[in-house]
Image: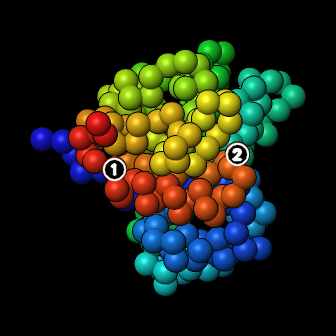
Amino acid sequence: MDAPLPALSLSLAEFEVGSSPRERILAAGELGYRAVTLDARAAGLRARDLDRSARRDLAATFRRAELRLAGIDLWIPESHFVDTAHQDRAIAVAIGTIDLAAELASLMPADPVVSVVLPAESATDARKALAAAAETAGVQIADHCWPLCAWDGPIGAGLDPVVALVEKADPLAAASNRSLVSARVCSLGDAALRVPVGSGASRLDLGAYRASLSLAPLLRTVVVDVRGLHDSLAGAEAALEAWNDADLFGSD
């Protein structure tokens, strides 16, 4: 029997609504989302900028809106994890984000998943450091490298179907990967530009994608990603509607 899918989350990365994290969180709830994924690089959400009081206030915003935290995105260049000029800082920022996810999960309903992109090779030191921190904190890391890597333990695979389409690969084949812990909901159009999921220009068969994800045994978060869209609010709204309408067994 297929596993039930996690509640669809909206990532705040490039969700250009309101002027503060609180406004964007509340806007996601008003659209109908029941989970939100934070952006670790956004002003007001960086781990180093959030003291204990600010973290409690952030958790209170989620609780009042009856929203679940579906993890944190940390989109920093993957090369920073191996470049000697940036490696120490990149690892420190990632560990700070892991600790933030763990603390927020202790304050509200949450799936503490931190999404990153690690180099497929030559990132042994970074991977070991992040795995150790995640293990200690009880946090899951979703590594969105491509091709998907067969990680286990505190590091699992993350899937961005846009990356698969750019690489001329089939995102449906990757969606049921046994190492998959987090999957994005986003799409590419014929002009190699990101387009709203569910639009006529979308190259992602959302029904079939959803059905494939239901076969991923470790999947913890499914996240709408509006990065690169001209209208992030309209894109978020369209994605939620299309997801809810998608046939679990794929479209004709």
At x 45%, y 41%, the residue is 183
Q: Is residue 167 left or right of residue 13?
A: left
Work out whether mark 1 precedes mark 2 in sequence or the reverse, and give the earlier one. Answer: 2
Which of the 4 image quadrants contains residue 6?
Answer: bottom left
The secondary structure type at the circle numbered 2 is loop
Q: Amino acid at mark 1?
A: Ala
Q: Is residue 130 visible?
A: no
Question: On the rendered image, what quadrant is the C terminus found in?
Answer: top left
Number of numbered tags placed on the structure image: 2
Q: Is residue 100 left or right of residue 81?
A: left
Q: Is residue 247 left or right of residue 73?
A: left
Residue marked by disc 2: 228
59 to 118, vertically: above or below: below
Q: CA distance from mark 1 to mark 2?
A: 23 Å
Q: Amino acid at mark 2?
A: Gly
Q: Position of residue 166 (x, y in %)?
A: 61, 24
Q: Is residue 129 left or right of residue 83?
A: left
Colouring method of the image: rainbow
Q: Is residue 166 visible?
A: yes
Residue marked by disc 1: 246
Question: On the rendered image, what quadrant is the N terminus found in?
Answer: top left
